[in-house]
Image (cartoon, grey):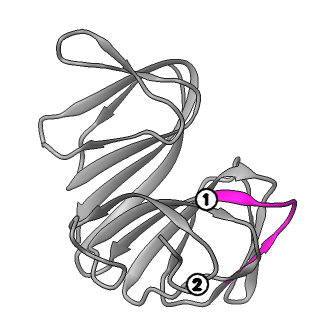
Amino acid sequence: MRWKNGGGVTREVIRFPPDSNLDDFAWRISVATVRNAGRFSTFSGVDRSLALIEGGGLLIRHKDRHFTLTPSIPVFAFAGEEPVDSFLIAGPVTDFNVMTRRRQYAHTVNRVAITGALRIPHSGHTCVVMVVRGLPCIMLPNLTLARLVPGDAVMIACLDQQLTLYAIEAEVMEVHIFDA
């Protein structure tokens, strides 16, 4: 999907509702490779969180401050209508982006390292987990394991669901979306 500002392309992980577009989604999770510096697209009434999952770093200019985002720095959160400029530090980067329509939903984003088992309970409206590094497995109800690879995402939408991931070493982005 082309960026709203025309400056790049994004791979959408999931969007709700499924038949929505960039002007009327309630929430959206995506991954983008940034090859050129520039101003972020404007999304009025939308809260955004951005994390780097690959690359040498992105310098963010937001209001009167500068912030360096790297794969080891957690998350940069901002209002989608605020002007935000970016500058590449050492070549292209890949970012993980979560957006929620402020009057409908809120969200949290965490980068989580897995060594062994990680249990992710359902909380809020929806939980989405996307694999960033490693090869975690999910224990399925019939006691078989399903292997995930980087870029795979799993959604938990039922209140009684939980997710347990197993890995020797992996990293995931964990998103919880809540009613506003």
- Residue at 54% x, 36% y is 150
- Residue at 23% x, 9% y is 143
Q: Which residues are magenta?
A: 85-94
Residue beneath disc 1: 95
Q: Amino acid at mark 2?
A: Gly
- Residue at 53% x, 24% y is 135
The percent position of residue 40, horizontal first and vertical second, equals 61, 82
Along the horizontal axis of the image, is 47 left or right of 83? left
Q: Are the residues at dot 2 and dot 1 in contact (C-beta closer than 8 Å)?
A: no
Q: How would you rate the neighbour count of disc 2 (Cα within 10 Å): few for under 14, some for 14-19, many for 20 or more?
A: few
In whole angstroms, how far apart are the C-alphas of marks 2 and 1?
Answer: 17 Å
- In the picture, residue 62 is in which quadrant? bottom right
> Which of the two labelled residues, at mark 2 and mark 1, occupies the earlier sequence position?
2
Instruction: Look at the image and say whether residue 16 sits in the magenta stretch.
Output: no
| Helix, strand or loop status at disc 1 | strand
- Residue at 61% x, 90% y is 83
Q: Nearer the viewer, mark 2 or mark 1?
A: 2
Query: How many numbered marks are there?
Result: 2
Q: Amino acid at mark 1?
A: Asp
Instruction: Look at the image and say whether residue 92 sits in the magenta stretch.
Output: yes
Note whether 4 is above or below 105 in the view shown: below
Residue 117 can be seen in this image: no
Nearest the viewer among 75 and 33 is: 33
Q: Residue furthest top?
A: 143
| Helix, strand or loop status at disc 2 | loop
Note whether 16 is above or below 122 in the view shown: below
Q: Residue furthest right?
A: 90
Residue 20 can be seen in this image: yes
The percent position of residue 35, horizontal first and vertical second, equals 74, 67
Residue beneath disc 2: 6
